[in-house]
């Protein structure tokens, strides 16, 4: 990647921001060396690694990283035979070993949830034996412990014994009346590693011993009594023995480190890489960034993108290039944000290719470019005595030589620094050449000729930075499709320049310039009218959809009412037929008893009654479609049926002919359903899908609880949005929702809390952690809403 580009875009400042989040020296070095990657698969993997680490931070907490120093020199020395590392250097290595073990242990508990991070962790090795050896031999304050060897322990016991013997003798001398006027201070001190007593200068002849030192004033001499010389000599020898044993222990540990130095080094590098990913995740959270969609087609579509180095209330921009057009030409007033827009596109492209998430919103897309060129700002080369124009031209020559269809070129103030006519002509030639090479270009300019060129040239599109003519302030928004209009006269007039001067200035303008400005003004007006009409059309369309939905709902109700009325009429007709049959039979029986009818007459009457009965039934059948009647009449115990209004399948376990209802088993639930709302189906097939939740509730025949359950089940959704709610409101709403979900047996459920500052996300996490019927929960995948959604699994 072009070094000039990285310098112009201030990528080093992004590195500094990233370094603040690293915890190891090696990760800091990795950050300092990072450059945009050009391999597509590598970049995709890096982006996914950052996403995985952000999910871990959001749902699992921070990994146990701790500050570690660079240990490469120590490892290198440890491989040299006979080298002895001191305790401080050994403890530096120990810290890396310990940090590697704790970090790996933390990530391994996450199992296979984060495969890319896991792949990094597999390269980290654990050196438990070496870690235990160092801990056993060296204390936290870098001292070699007594337990490091039996010999060291024995020597130190002798030293303590010898020191105590010396101190006893010295104490006896100090307290002796014989030396009370000789001793300067009744204390014991050490000079040249030997115990001595401070003696007055004028009384030294009264105190037999060896002088080792004197005070600055010369009034005090530090004398070792003759009777302690042998004891001090013995102590000195023991101290030498102690040092020799310590070196022996350290040499042994150093040799063990040297044996494993290669493995420790590789683990150290892998730990740094994981730390680097950790820093990327923290920076992404800080920027409220997203993982961009990546492509290899040169297409850039940034939605509400923000320049990462700007602070305060940063205005986001929407900008795209590479799909409908390869060249985007931005025009507008000075300080309107053109240069910032160019730098935003370039810097976000560089960040994406370094595995960094970008400050934009979801669905933003960015291409992987092999080369990115920037010609931005006043880069006058004083040393070579080149003018601004010459300096720009020199770099543009390089761009034309090296840029291709896999390149992104950012050109600021195209055609500036020279004669406007010639500058515009050169700019059009440059853009034409880049267009032929299919280079993706975002450029800014003030030249009106280039605005016209963009209108008339296929593959080139105008854009502008918006300017508020009322406040005379830029809004920094970018509108694609329209060129920027000159605001010089408007600004001058608002600032008090007389109308007469403005009028004279306008007279000096060429007719083409006036026509161009008027055309742009007319296009702006037409665009506003079109946008207004579009808005009205959308409102009308939305209203028509609502009316359509309402009518559909009403029609459905009418159809249901019609079916209900027809069913009731059918049921009533059947009752009348039954009553008619009973009465006819009673009449015939009575006539027979009274012997009024003979056999033949009875047969004739019965035949007539049956004919009437048949006709009544035929008329009754017309009240309800035959298909519906057949379904109801054919249903029997043991049949598998579809409950049409609930769209649930079950088995008929009882039929109540009087009430025309059936008891249906749906999984673990038994409910009463009108027979007319059932449709017989083939035997139930077990579904392997987990998308349809299993509902279960104890059966209470036609009870109030069944009705409540069916009502909830019919309208319950497996997602809840608590975005923009206060924490207290969200808690109440979520608790009620989870209770209903558990009652209905719905799992999983999607809790939409948004990204924001993560306050609601943390609150959801806390609630789910303490609710007993929550089996597990996780953050949503990118396709499910990412860190803005938490998915909870409820116990069955």
Image: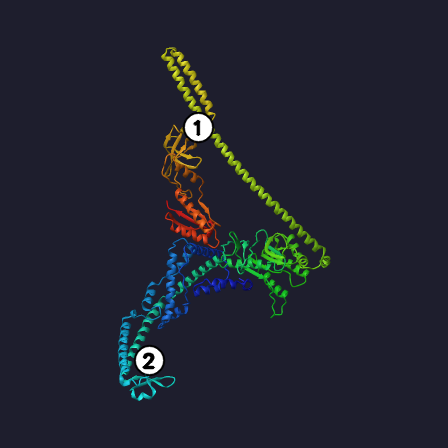
Q: Position of residue 161 (x, y in %)?
A: 26, 76
The 10 Å Cα crowd at callout 1, few under 14, some 14 to 19, many 20 or more, is: some
Q: Position of residue 81 (x, y in %)?
A: 35, 72
Do residues under tags 2 and 1 come within 8 Å of each other at their CB atoms? no
Say if 355 sits above or below 563 in the image. Answer: below
Instruction: Give the alpha-carbon distance from disc 2 to disc 1, as whole Å.
Output: 115 Å
Residue under label 2, please give it. 190
Q: Position of residue 650 (x, y in %)?
A: 39, 36
Tag of residue 620:
none
Q: Could you tell me if residue 560 is visible in this image?
A: yes
Q: Could you tell me if residue 355 is visible in this image?
A: no
Residue under label 1, please give it. 629
Q: Position of residue 211 (x, y in %)?
A: 32, 85
Say if 230 sits above or below 455 in the image. Answer: below
User: Under tag 1, what secondary structure?
Assistant: helix
Q: Residue at x 34, y 65 (%)?
A: 131
Q: Earlier in the sequence, mark 2 or mark 1?
A: 2
Callout in the foreground (2, 1): 2
Q: Which of the 4 image quadrants contains residue 463?
A: bottom right
Q: Which of the 4 image quadrants contains residue 494?
A: bottom right
The quadrant of the picture occupied by the C terminus is: top left
In the drawing, does residue 400 fall left or right of residue 513?
left
User: Under tag 2, what secondary structure?
Assistant: strand
In the drawing, does residue 32 fall left or right of residue 173?
right
């Amino acid at each position: 990647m072009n070094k000039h580009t990285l310098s112009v875009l201030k990528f080093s400042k992004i590195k500094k921001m990233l370094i603040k989040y690293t915890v190891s020296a090696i990760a800091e070095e990795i950050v300092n060396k990072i450059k945009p990657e050009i391999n597509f698969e590598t970049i995709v993997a890096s982006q996914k690694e950052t996403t995985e680490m952000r999910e871990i931070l959001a749902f699992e907490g921070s990994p146990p990283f701790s500050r570690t120093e660079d240990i490469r020199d120590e490892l290198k020395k440890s491989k040299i035979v006979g080298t002895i590392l001191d305790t401080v250097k050994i403890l530096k290595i120990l810290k890396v070993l310990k940090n590697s073990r704790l970090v790996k242990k933390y990530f391994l508990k996450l199992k296979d949830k984060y495969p890319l991070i896991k792949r990094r962790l597999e390269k980290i090795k654990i050196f438990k034996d070496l870690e235990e050896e160092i801990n056993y031999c060296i204390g936290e304050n870098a001292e070699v412990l007594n337990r490091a060897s039996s010999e060291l322990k024995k020597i130190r016991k002798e030293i303590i014994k010898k020191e105590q013997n010396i101190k006893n003798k010295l104490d006896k001398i100090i307290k002796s009346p014989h030396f009370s006027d000789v001793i300067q201070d009744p204390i014991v001190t050490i000079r040249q590693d030997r115990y001595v007593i401070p003696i007055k200068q004028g009384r030294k002849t009264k105190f037999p011993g060896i002088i080792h030192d004197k005070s600055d004033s010369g009034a005090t001499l530090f004398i070792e009594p003759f009777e302690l010389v042998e004891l001090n000599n013995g102590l000195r020898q023991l101290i030498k023995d102690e040092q020799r044993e310590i070196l022996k222990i350290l040499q042994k540990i150093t040799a063990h480190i040297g044996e494993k130095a290669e493995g420790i080094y590789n683990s150290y590098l892998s730990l740094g890489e994981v730390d680097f990913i950790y820093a990327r995740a923290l920076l992404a959270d800080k920027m409220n960034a997203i993982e961009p969609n990546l492509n290899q087609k040169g297409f850039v579509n940034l939605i509400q993108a923000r320049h990462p180095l700007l602070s305060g209330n940063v205005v986001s921009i929407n900008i795209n290039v590479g799909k409908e057009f390869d060249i985007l030409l931005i025009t507008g007033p000075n300080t309107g944000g053109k240069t910032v827009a160019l730098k935003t596109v370039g810097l976000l492209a560089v960040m994406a290719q370094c595995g960094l998430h970008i400050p934009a919103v979801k669905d933003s897309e960015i291409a992987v470019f092999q080369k990115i060129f920037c010609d931005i700002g006043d880069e006058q080369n004083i040393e070579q005595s080149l003018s601004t124009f010459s300096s720009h031209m020199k770099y543009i020559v390089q761009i034309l030589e090296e840029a291709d269809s896999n390149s992104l070129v950012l050109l600021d103030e195209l055609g500036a620094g020279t004669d406007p006519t010639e500058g515009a002509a050169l700019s059009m030639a440059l853009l034409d050449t880049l267009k032929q090479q299919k280079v993706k270009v975002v450029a800014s300019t003030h030249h009106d000729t280039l605005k016209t060129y963009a209108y008339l040239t296929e593959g080139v599109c105008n854009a502008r930075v918006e300017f508020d003519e009322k406040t005379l302030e830029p809004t920094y928004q970018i509108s694609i499709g329209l060129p920027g209009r000159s605001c010089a006269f408007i600004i001058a007039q608002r600032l008090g320049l007389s109308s007469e001067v403005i009028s004279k200035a306008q007279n000096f303008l060429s007719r083409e310039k006036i026509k161009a400005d008027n055309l742009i003004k007319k296009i702006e007006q037409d665009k506003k009218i079109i946008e207004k009409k579009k808005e009205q059309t959308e409102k009308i369309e939305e209203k028509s959809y609502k009316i359509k939905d309402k009518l559909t709902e009403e029609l459905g109700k009418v159809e249901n009412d019609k079916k209900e009325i027809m069913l009731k009429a059918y049921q009533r007709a059947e009752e009348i037929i039954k009553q008619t049959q009973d009465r006819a039979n009673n009449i015939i029986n009575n006539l027979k008893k009274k012997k009024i009818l003979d056999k033949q007459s009875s047969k004739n009457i019965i035949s007539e009654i049956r004919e009437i009965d048949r006709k009544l039934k035929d008329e009754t059948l017309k009240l309800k479609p035959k298909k519906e009647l057949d379904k109801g009449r054919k249903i029997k115990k043991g049949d598998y049926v579809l409950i049409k209004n609930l769209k649930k399948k079950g088995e008929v376990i009882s039929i109540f002919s009087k009430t025309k209802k059936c008891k249906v088993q749906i999984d673990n639930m038994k409910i009463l359903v009108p027979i007319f709302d059932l449709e017989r189906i083939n035997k139930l097939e077990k579904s392997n899908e987990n998308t349809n939740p299993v509902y279960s509730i104890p059966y209470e025949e036609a009870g109030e609880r069944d009705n409540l359950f069916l009502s909830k089940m019919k309208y319950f959704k497996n997602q809840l949005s608590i975005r923009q709610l206060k924490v207290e409101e969200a808690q109440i709403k979520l608790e009620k929702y989870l209770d209903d979900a558990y009652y209905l047996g719905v799992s999983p459920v999607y809790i939409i809390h948004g990204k924001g500052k993560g306050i609601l996300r943390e609150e959801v996490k806390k609630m789910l952690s303490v609710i007993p019927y929550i089996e597990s929960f996780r953050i949503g995948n990118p396709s499910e809403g990412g860190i803005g959604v938490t998915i909870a699994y409820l116990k069955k």
